[in-house]
Image: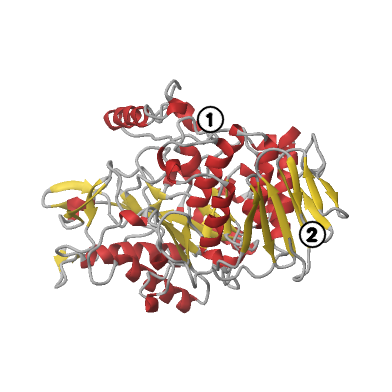
């Protein structure tokens, strides 16, 4: 290969066609897969394969994406979402998601990783969709079919580290990483040290390939608070600017969403206001408040919230609870809220879902709050029918690394009171992965079907409520008492009792929805409304929605 003036090496090879396998020898070592490989059909340690990124015939020319204000996210793991665990099988579930009211699917990371099962955050081939779920064209077909149904597709990407097994970037250059920054996974990716420009380009090009070659509607960036960069212009700013430029050129909406624990309004503010310009951020404080209130968790980060109903109200008004960053001028839809996601289930020792920790009446009330808030909701696969399956942490590393992961996992939970006597499932076991697969047949059976009715109804109701609005302390979310929240939005008022039974005074119009409707609760205990006394009586936790005019209030 010939070295160019900018330090890259290139060669022209005749007779290369899609499907051709190739690899590199560098300084007498190798063979190594291409660090920008589009496909690794034999795994991340095998040769790369040539892919024609323009060979797929798209059918979404009229698709312009969705506004974040219209997003109802549904997070899935491609391997655990269906029994087959493939892109093609996931595509067959798209009509179901459409009927549920989902407008955006979010895949956990798809960049290829070692082994045949993994959450994806240990990816090492960032340009190659994981071959265990299907071919690159299978993924394109999923996106194409989603767009034809009006569903956007997002993918998680990891730009804070590469996985520990199969990361060949350093075999091509010693400058992919820097000792100038340390991360939880080792040396930081080189965004600000010697010869960082090609590394920054590598990451930005990765984001653009997902957008151009797979027609993705957005990316969710993992743990942006661990992306270290002391440059005058942060890599996140450059990355967002490149994505916005591509969005304009393509004539469709493309969004970047951050996962960031710092609760910084700068993540969401435009570059012109000294921000990074991201469209949205996962705001975990709402989840933490709700989990502490409803399930009583106090270990780890749950200790940073108090879980009181007034604190939930304050969190909703500000977007987050911890920190002092003022979100004024930020749109409520830019905060992505959940009561479950892959982290909050899978990073529990036993992978147990929220509904396993409480009565389903409480779960219904919490769901009503999530789906009727102005923030953007995210559901985790199976949440809508209260899936009985856990979502566990699973890997398929080589034996030595696998043992270290298993031991580390068990040590991690040794200090948690709730898990101190539990047998932590082995991440390396294939049984752990299989146990995490959804059992689709249960969604139509017994109480699961009632919960599915509830979710469909709430998502549909949500879409009738206009104006998500800018963050403002004037948003009416208040604690009516230590167990009950009031939410008022355009045309509706919602009373949510999260704990216990009791009475609440209200002055509203006709009730139009409640969580104790017999189609949602097989053991319905009706919520009593005495309009003459302006009194609502809950025999257990629940939620009720009133149709109101702007003049009516509590």
Residue 376: image location, x then y, percent: 57, 59
Quarter of the image with the C terminus is bottom right
Please say if 177 is above or below 426: below
Q: Can residue 526 be seen from the camera position used here?
A: yes
Label annotation for residue 435: 1
Label annotation for residue 9: none
Question: Residue at the right extreme?
Answer: 532
Residue 327: image location, x then y, percent: 47, 67
Q: Can residue 99 be seen from the camera position used here?
A: no
**Relative to the observer, which residue lies in front, 136 or 285?**
285
In which image quadrant can residue 545 be found? bottom right
In which image quadrant can residue 302 be found? top left
Residue density around tag 2, few if under 14, some if 14–19, many if 20 or more, within 10 Å: some
Determine the secondary structure under disc 1: helix
The answer to whether 217 appears left or right of 227 in the picture is right
Q: Which residue is depicted at the point 48% across and 45% down?
A: 133
**Relative to the observer, which residue lies in front, 422 or 323?**
323
Upstream in the sequence, badge 1 or badge 2?
Answer: 1
Q: How many marks?
A: 2
Residue 464: image location, x then y, percent: 73, 64
**Relative to the observer, which residue lies in front, 151 or 51?**
151
Question: Residue at the left extreme?
Answer: 27
């Amino acid at each position: 290969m010939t070295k160019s003036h900018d330090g890259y090496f290139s060669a022209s090879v005749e007779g290369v066609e899609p499907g051709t396998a190739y690899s590199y020898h560098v300084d007498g070592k190798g063979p190594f897969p291409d660090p920008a490989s589009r496909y690794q059909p034999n795994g991340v340690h095998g040769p790369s394969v040539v892919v024609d990124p323009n060979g797929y015939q798209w059918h979404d020319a009229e698709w312009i994406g969705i506004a974040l204000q219209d997003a109802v996210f549904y997070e899935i793991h491609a391997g655990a979402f269906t029994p087959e665990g493939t892109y093609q099988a996931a595509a067959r579930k798209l009509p179901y998601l459409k009927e549920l009211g989902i407008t955006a699917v979010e895949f956990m990371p798809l960049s290829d990783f070692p082994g045949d099962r993994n959450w994806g955050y240990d990816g090492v081939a960032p340009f190659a969709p994981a071959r265990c779920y299907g071919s690159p064209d299978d993924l394109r077909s999923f996106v194409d079919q989603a767009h034809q149904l009006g569903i956007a597709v997002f993918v998680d990407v990891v730009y804070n580290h590469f996985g520990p097994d199969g990361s060949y970037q350093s075999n091509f250059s010693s400058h992919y990483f820097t000792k100038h920054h340390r991360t939880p996974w080792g040396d930081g990716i080189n965004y600000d040290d010697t010869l960082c420009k090609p590394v920054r380009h590598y990451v930005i090009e990765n984001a653009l390939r997902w957008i151009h070659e797979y027609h993705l509607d957005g990316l969710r960036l993992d743990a942006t608070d661990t992306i270290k960069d002391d440059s005058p212009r942060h890599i996140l700013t450059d990355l967002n600017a490149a994505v916005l430029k591509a969005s304009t050129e393509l004539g469709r909406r493309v969004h970047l969403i951050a996962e960031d624990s710092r609760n910084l309004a700068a993540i969401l503010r435009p570059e012109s206001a000294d921000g990074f310009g991201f469209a949205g951020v996962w705001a975990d404080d709402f989840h933490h408040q709700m989990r502490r209130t409803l399930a009583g968790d106090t270990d780890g980060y749950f200790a940073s919230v108090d879980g009181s109903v007034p604190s939930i109200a304050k969190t909703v008004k500000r977007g987050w609870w911890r920190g002092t960053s003022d979100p004024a001028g930020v749109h409520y839809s830019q905060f992505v809220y959940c009561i479950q996601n892959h982290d909050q289930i899978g990073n529990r020792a036993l992978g147990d879902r929220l509904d396993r920790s409480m009565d389903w009446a409480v779960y219904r009330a919490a769901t009503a709050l999530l789906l009727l808030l102005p923030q953007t909701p995210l559901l985790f696969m199976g949440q809508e029918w209260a899936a009985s399956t856990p979502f566990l942490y699973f890997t398929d590393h080589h034996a030595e690394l696998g043992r270290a992961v298993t031991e580390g996992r068990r040590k991690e939970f040794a200090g948690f009171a709730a898990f101190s006597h539990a047998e932590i499932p082995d991440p390396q076991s294939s049984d752990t992965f299989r146990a995490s697969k959804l059992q689709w047949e249960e969604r139509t059976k017994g109480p699961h079907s009632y919960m599915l009715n509830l979710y469909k109804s709430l998502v549909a109701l949500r879409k009738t409520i206009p104006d998500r609005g800018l963050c403002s302390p004037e948003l009416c979310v208040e604690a009516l008492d230590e167990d009950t929240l009031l939410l008022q939005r355009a045309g509706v008022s919602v009373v949510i009792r999260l704990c216990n039974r009791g009475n609440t005074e209200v002055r509203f119009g006709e009730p139009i929805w409640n969580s104790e409707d017999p189609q949602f609760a097989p053991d319905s205990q009706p919520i009593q409304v005495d309009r003459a006394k302006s009194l609502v009586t809950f025999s257990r936790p629940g939620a009720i929605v009133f149709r109101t005019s702007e003049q009516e209030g509590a």
